[in-house]
């Protein structure tokens, strides 16, 4: 695996999945859909940059950026129809399985 910076997770509070979802829903409520969609785009760009650096053997904050994107995806999930997302997920995983299994 490529080099990463911030390989050690910072110590601090530990939240349950339900607490994380509630905090993320609260962020969407407080800041609004538009603001959080723009923030999602920003965080995805930062993750993409880190992935390119890591793929080229350069130090990258891949883990930290992945965590930022995961937080924003949880917020996005609270804005969208979860059943529709699950249907697309199942479709995409089926397609990936076909590719992997040949």
Image: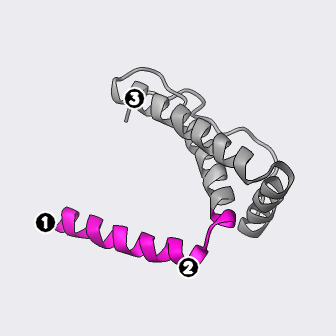
Whether residues under marks 2 and 3 lie with C-beta atoms below 8 angstroms apart, the answer is: no
Residue at numbered disc 3: 52
Residue 81 image-quadrant placement? bottom right
Q: Residue furthest top?
A: 58
Query: Camera-side residue: 83 or 16?
Result: 83
Q: Which residues are magenta?
A: 77-102
Residue at 75% from the left image edge and 60% from the top image edge: 20
Residue at numbered disc 2: 83
Question: What is the C-alpha distance between the residues marked 2 and 1?
Answer: 29 Å
Place of residue 6 in the rendered image (x, y in percent of width and height, measured from the top left): 60, 30
Residue 102: give its label.
1
Instruction: Note whether 3 is above or below 65 in the view shown.
Output: above
Sequence-wise first label, 3 or 1 = 3
Q: Residue furthest right?
A: 30
Does residue 46 show up? Answer: yes
Question: Is 8 placed left or right of 88 in the picture?
Answer: right
Please name which of the two marks, 2 or 3, marks the residue nearer to the observer: 2
Place of residue 12 in the rendered image (x, y in percent of width and height, measured from the top left): 80, 44
Q: Magenta region, mostly helix, strand or loop?
A: helix
């Amino acid at each position: 695996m490529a080099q990463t910076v911030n390989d050690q997770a910072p110590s601090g509070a530990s939240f349950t999945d339900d607490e994380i979802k509630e905090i993320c829903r609260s962020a969407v409520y407080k800041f609004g859909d538009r603001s959080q969609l723009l923030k999602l785009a920003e965080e995805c760009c930062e993750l993409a940059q880190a992935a390119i650096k890591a793929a080229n053997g350069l130090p990258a904050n891949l883990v930290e950026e992945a965590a930022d994107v995961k937080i924003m995806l949880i917020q996005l999930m609270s804005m969208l129809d979860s059943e529709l997302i699950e249907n697309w997920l199942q479709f995409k995983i089926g397609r990936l399985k076909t590719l992997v299994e040949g």
